[in-house]
Image: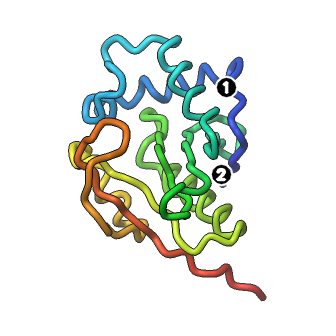
C-alpha cells in the first residue's frame, strides 16, 4: 500500500528525496537535468523547490506501509494549454525498484486526479529515456504526440491515459 502526501521538502523527507534522486543516475544521464556524478544536495533541493513551488504544481511523496519514502512525483495540476493534469516526473528509489512502488504511486496519483474530475492524465517521456517507455505503456499510457519538451526542446513522447470513472457499489 502506498500513501501520498504533499512534499514538505524538509528534514528527513528532503534527505530521502535527495537519496532517491542519487539512486537514479541513468535518468539524469538521459535527461541532462543533473550531473549524476556530481549531484549535490543543494542542487537537488533547488530543483525540487523550484518545481514544487511553481504555479499550479505540486510534489507528492509516496510512502510504503511502514511510512518509508519510496518515491515521489511532480505534478502539474492543470496544463495551461490542454487543461489536463500531467505527471511531470516520477522517481522511485533505485534501491527498491521493480517492487511495484512506481505502479502504486501512479495509481494513487490517477485516483486523486479521477476524484478531482479529470478524464485523462498526460506525461512526457524523453525519447532518450527509452527505459521508461515500456513502464508507462504497461500502465495503459499511449503516445499521442512526439514533440520537443517546453523546457529544453528535447524530443519527447507525449503520453496519455484516459481515466475511467471509479466504480461505485
Residue name at image x 67 percent, y 79 percent: 166
Secondary structure of the residue carrying tag 1 is: loop
Secondary structure of the residue carrying tag 2 is: loop
Residue 133 in the image, given as x and y percentages of width and height? 29, 56
Residue name at image x 60 percent, y 26 percent: 49
Residue name at image x 39 percent, y 67 percent: 141
Q: Quadrant of residue 109?
A: bottom right
Which numbered circle lies on residue 74? none
Residue name at image x 29 percent, y 28 percent: 32
Q: Nearer the viewer, mark 2 or mark 1?
A: 1
Asked if the residue under mark 1 is in contact with the one under mark 2, i.e. CB atoms within 8 Å, the reply is: no
Residue 75 in the image, given as x and y percentages of width and height? 57, 48
64 in relation to 139, above or below: above
Q: Residue furthest bottom?
A: 169
- Residue indicated by mark 1: 9
Picture quarter with the C terminus = bottom right
Apparent side of residue 122 relative to residue 5 in the rendered image (left or right) = left
Residue 97 in the image, given as x and y percentages of width and height? 43, 42
Residue 117 in the image, given as x and y percentages of width and height? 68, 72
Apparent side of residue 47 relative to residue 158 in the rendered image (left or right) = right
Q: Earlier in the sequence, mark 2 or mark 1?
A: 2
Picture quarter with the N terminus = bottom right
Please name whichever residue, 73 or 138, is drawn nearer the observer in this view of the structure: 73
Q: Residues within 10 Å of mark 2 (few under 14, many from 20)?
A: many
Please name whichever residue, 3 or 127, is drawn nearer the observer in this view of the structure: 127
Q: Residues within 10 Å of mark 1 (few under 14, many from 20)?
A: some
Q: Quadrant of residue 157?
A: bottom left
Question: Rounded to the nearest whole Å, what is the CA distance between mark 2 and mark 1?
Answer: 19 Å
- Residue indicated by mark 2: 2
132 in relation to 72, above or below: below
Q: Quadrant of residue 160?
A: bottom left
Amino acid at each position: 500500500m502506498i500513501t501520498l502526501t504533499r512534499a514538505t521538502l524538509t528534514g528527513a523527507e528532503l534527505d530521502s528525496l535527495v537519496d532517491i534522486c542519487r539512486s537514479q543516475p541513468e535518468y539524469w544521464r538521459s535527461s541532462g537535468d543533473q550531473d549524476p556524478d556530481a549531484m549535490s544536495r543543494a542542487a537537488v533541493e533547488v530543483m525540487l523547490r523550484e518545481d514544487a513551488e511553481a504555479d499550479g504544481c505540486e510534489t507528492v511523496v509516496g510512502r510504503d506501509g511502514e511510512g518509508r519514502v519510496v518515491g515521489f512525483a511532480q505534478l502539474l495540476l492543470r496544463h495551461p494549454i490542454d487543461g489536463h493534469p500531467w505527471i511531470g516526473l516520477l522517481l522511485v528509489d533505485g534501491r527498491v525498484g521493480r517492487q511495484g512502488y512506481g505502479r502504486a504511486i501512479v495509481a494513487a496519483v490517477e485516483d486523486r486526479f479521477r476524484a478531482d474530475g479529470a478524464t485523462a492524465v498526460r506525461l512526457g517521456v524523453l525519447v532518450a529515456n527509452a527505459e521508461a517507455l515500456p513502464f508507462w505503456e504497461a500502465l495503459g499510457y499511449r503516445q499521442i504526440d512526439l514533440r520537443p519538451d517546453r523546457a529544453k526542446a528535447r524530443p519527447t513522447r507525449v503520453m496519455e491515459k484516459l481515466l475511467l470513472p471509479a466504480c461505485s457499489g
